[in-house]
Amino acid sequence: MRWEVVQRTAASGRVDYHRPVSIRRILVTGGAGFLGSHLCERLVRAGEDVICLDNFFTSQKSNVAHLLSEPNFELIRHDITHPIFLEVDEIYNLACPAAPGHYQYNPIKTMKTSVLGAINVLGLAKRCGAKVLQASTSEVYGDPDQHPQRETYWGHVNPIGPRACYDEGKRAAETLFFDYRRMNRVRTKVVRIFNTYGPRMHPFDGRVVSNFIRQALRGEDITLFGDGEQTRSFCYVDDLIDGLMRMMAAPDEEAGPINLGNPDEFTIRRLAELCIERTGSKAGIVHRPMPEDDPRQRQPDITLARDRLGWAPTVGLEAGLDRTIAWFRSIRLEDYRAPTPNY
Ligand code: NAD
Ligand code: UDP
């Protein structure tokens, strides 16, 4: 709930009293996950009424345990492939496994989560007149042959490869968002998120940052896939959450798609070296085969986000890695269940 301070003059002098100005009920699907838990935390702190929905496939309650005692936070165990009836004003649709080892574990379920999940949140938004934001991905560009990637680029996606369940699921979700907007006037928003990292990444999600930090801290060899010359652009989680909230707050005409990511591009080899340096590890580097359809390069063009949302990342890779490493040092790996054998 939001409160405003109203000043009144009374016999005793000027007094302040607080009155509620609005209650915004915000649903975050996938709210217990890496990005979702940070988003819930920011929304709860801002005084919003937050409903976190999750089936805990790739997350655990500990990510939001610190919010459970807050009166403006509620946690629901639910699978978004099934409809849900709630009264809400805004929806952030984040429910979907995001790490390759997670989304490839049960590719049919991944596709259902993207497509049926989108239909269910769009139906909910339509019934409630709510705004709804889709967490889309740079994967809609596939293995891009345009660089950096702008929102006007239609992508280069293999529709039948091992990454297709995720890439094509997210592309279909974008289609649904724009069709519900055109046909049913639903207030939709689509952001395309590029590789984001930070505290609360699942330590066994198999993503590059979590793998490298976990391996470096344990003194295990860093597993570099291929020659390590493929590139990614890494965005720190706080910056990304700021972008999501700015997009939601933007006028309804701002439907996107809008890229959110850090344009600083690094080779994966450089990331491995940085993880070794910043952890002070003696870990070596071993080469593993390049996974099928692994994109060679990825860098967001964020001109639209800068112009329309006044957004740009503020945290550089070294500072972000230091914060992430500190978090990895603070957790006990035994407290985490690997969601799939793929890490
Ligand atoms: P994550 O795996 O930590 O979070 C996803 C959450 O969704 C988890 O809590 C999981 O349990 C939940 N979930 C999965 N299937 C569900 C279902 N059927 N019903 C209900 N909940 C379900 O991943 P993340 O990195 O936090 O990603 C969040 C969203 O952002 C995803 O939609 C992802 O595609 C998107 N995204 C993330 C990145 C990134 O780099 N982190 C990049 C691009 C897009
Ligand atoms: N990668 C790697 N070693 C690992 C995990 C990933 O070299 O242990 C590489 C992977 O091949 C890819 C990049 O790091 O080129 C990013 O992989 P991630 O799974 O984090 O995300 P995505 O490929 O979806 O961008």
Image (cartoon, rainbow, N blue to C red):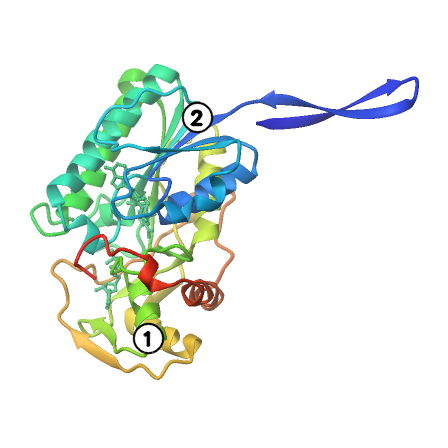
Residue count near mark 2 (Cα–Cα under 10 Å), binned few <14, some 14–19, many ≥20: few
Relative height, residue 1 to residue 158 (above, below)? above
Q: How many marks?
A: 2
Residues 248 and 101: in front is 101
Given the image, on which type of amino acid does mark 2 rest?
Asp
Between disc 2 and disc 1, whose residue precedes? 1
Quadrant where the N terminus is found in the figure = top right
Residues 254 and 287: in front is 287
Residue count near mark 1 (Cα–Cα under 10 Å), binned few <14, some 14–19, many ≥20: few
Please indicate, yes or no, whether residue 156 appears anywhere in the rendered image: no
Which residue does the numbered mark 1 point to in the structure image?
Answer: 218
Given the image, on which type of amino acid does mark 1 rest?
Arg
Residue 109: give x, y in percent of width and height: 15, 40
Mark 2 near ligand 1 (CB under 8 Å)?
no
Which residue does the numbered mark 2 point to in the structure image?
Answer: 252
Residue 135: give x, y in percent of width and height: 33, 40
Residue 183: give x, y in percent of width and height: 27, 17
Q: Is residue 271 left or right of residue 72?
A: left
Q: Is residue 122 left or right of residue 25?
A: left
Residues 267 and 213: in front is 213
